[in-house]
Amino acid sequence: MRLAEFKHDLPFHIVIVILVFISIYPFIFMLISSFKTTEEVFHNFFGLPSSLEYRNYLDAWKEVSPFLLNTIIVSVITMFGVLVLSSIDAYIFTRFDFPGKDILFFLILSLLMIPGILTLVPRFLVVRDLKLLNTYWALILPYIAGGQVMPIFILRSFFSSIPKELFESAKIDGASETQCFLKITIPLSKSILFTVGLMNFLNIWNEYVWPLVTVTEPKLFPITVGLVVFQSRYAGSAAWGPLFAGYTIASIPIVILFLFTMKYYIAGITSGALKA
């Protein structure tokens, strides 16, 4: 029976293995190339390096580390800002009834249908008039404001699945609405909060267009813009080893973050976080 099931599922498993290999091969190739000399990159493109060129990472770190720090600062502050505000908003939409609640929620969801590029100029004008250009806040505040729509939708769906009897029991024991939120809703929603936080963190980490138009001082560049500057310096000198090392350094924090939070990310999805 098991042999028959294995033969039946074998084509599916082969396809999965091929897709996984296609997904991770660019990272493996980048990692291998980061230890090569410039000559090996050109003459042994797909092969392994004859020796590990650690100096590539030293050269890349000097250039990339400030950009990496900027991105971590912006991403972490934005992630916590989005989690705090969107969880409060979702809780209000779940637990309270007020006139126009459904209309307001629909208007918030309708923002998902507006491409971000259409609001680029209005956002830039607002940030400029607030004199926030070339500051961290030029990145953080718009990210927090624009990053709440999907989290509100996801968290509201999850909060609605929490039994109302828990809140009624807490109310009988004298708990306030704030205590219900902090001591019931948040502890029961750790998995979904990790999922939403990770999704938001990845989106901010990979953002390129907005920092390109709002930040012109190199000391404030995030990693996406900084890598372009880094590439323009090293690609011209054909120093591809440090260039690949810089790309690898920029990827490592995301890989580490996903490895440590993967359990919570999967738990959030399987618990119905994305059921809607």
Image (cartoon, rainbow, N blue to C red):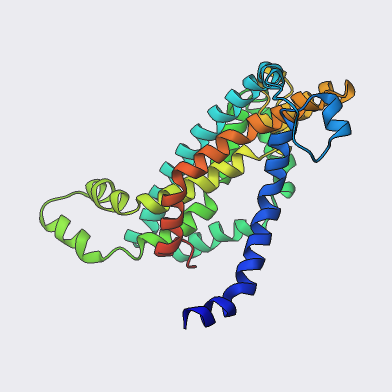
Q: Is residue 268 visible?
A: yes
Quadrant of the rendered structure where residue 13 is? bottom right
Is the residue 3 above or below the residue 27 in the image?
below
Quadrant of the rendered structure where residue 227 is? top right
Which residue occupies 48% across, 45% down? 197
Q: Nearer the viewer, residue 161 or 56?
A: 56
Q: Position of residue 171 (x, y in %)?
A: 16, 56
Q: Is residue 96 visible?
A: no
> From the viewer's perspective, is 242 left or right of 39?
left
Is the residue 197 above or below the residue 139 in the image?
below
Q: Nearer the viewer, residue 225 or 5?
A: 5
Quadrant of the rendered structure where residue 232 is? top right
> From the viewer's perspective, is 61 left or right of 158?
right
Is the residue 6 above or below the residue 203 in the image?
below
**Residue found farthest to the left:** 173
Q: Position of residue 77 (x, y in %)?
A: 49, 32
Q: Position of residue 151 (x, y in %)?
A: 49, 52
Which residue occupies 60% across, 29% down? 71
Q: How many marks?
A: 0
Q: Nearer the viewer, residue 63 or 273?
A: 63
Which residue occupies 10% across, 54% down? 173
